[in-house]
Image: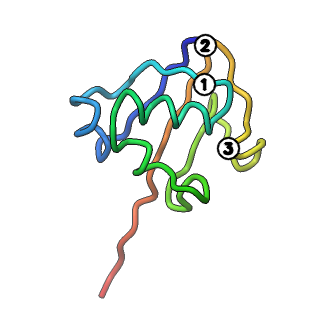
Amino acid sequence: MAITVYIPTPFRDLTRGQGHVPANGATIAALIDDLESRYPGLGERIADVDGVHHHVNVFVNGQEMRSLAGEGTPLADGDEVAFIPALVGGYE
């Protein structure tokens, strides 16, 4: 199963600068495990034992995973997944 994963700029230090990488997984959770095995440290930036970090938005073919089945969202060959960290900041 080939899934295309968009890697945002803040995470590209772990993917040798690549903005898109192939990965495998039947669900979002399995995909994160596969990414961690290919790019050590990437999984930790996306999720922990409680699931995907609240500040990371995950899109499957343009739909936010939390509106689907969360980390259990099924994936299929040809899907596109994007991990987008929320931008934080503000005025002091």
Dot 1: element = loop
Residue type at mark 3 is Glu
Q: Residue at x 61, y 59 (%)?
A: 50
Residue 25, quarter of the rendered image: top right
Q: Which residue is mark 3?
A: 71
The mark lying in front, picked from 2 and 3, is: 3
Q: Nearer the viewer, residue 20 or 44?
A: 44
Disc 3 to disc 1, how far (Cα)?
11 Å
Q: Sequence-wise, which precedes: disc 2 or disc 3? A: 3
Q: Which residue is mark 1?
A: 25
- Label for residue 78? 2
Residue type at mark 1 is Gly
Badge 2 density bin: few <14, some 14–19, many ≥20, Cα 10 Å: few
Q: Position of residue 43 (x, y in %)?
A: 44, 43
For this orientation, the residue located farthest to the bottom is: 92
Q: Nearer the viewer, residue 73 or 37?
A: 37
Disc 2 to disc 3, how far (Cα)?
18 Å
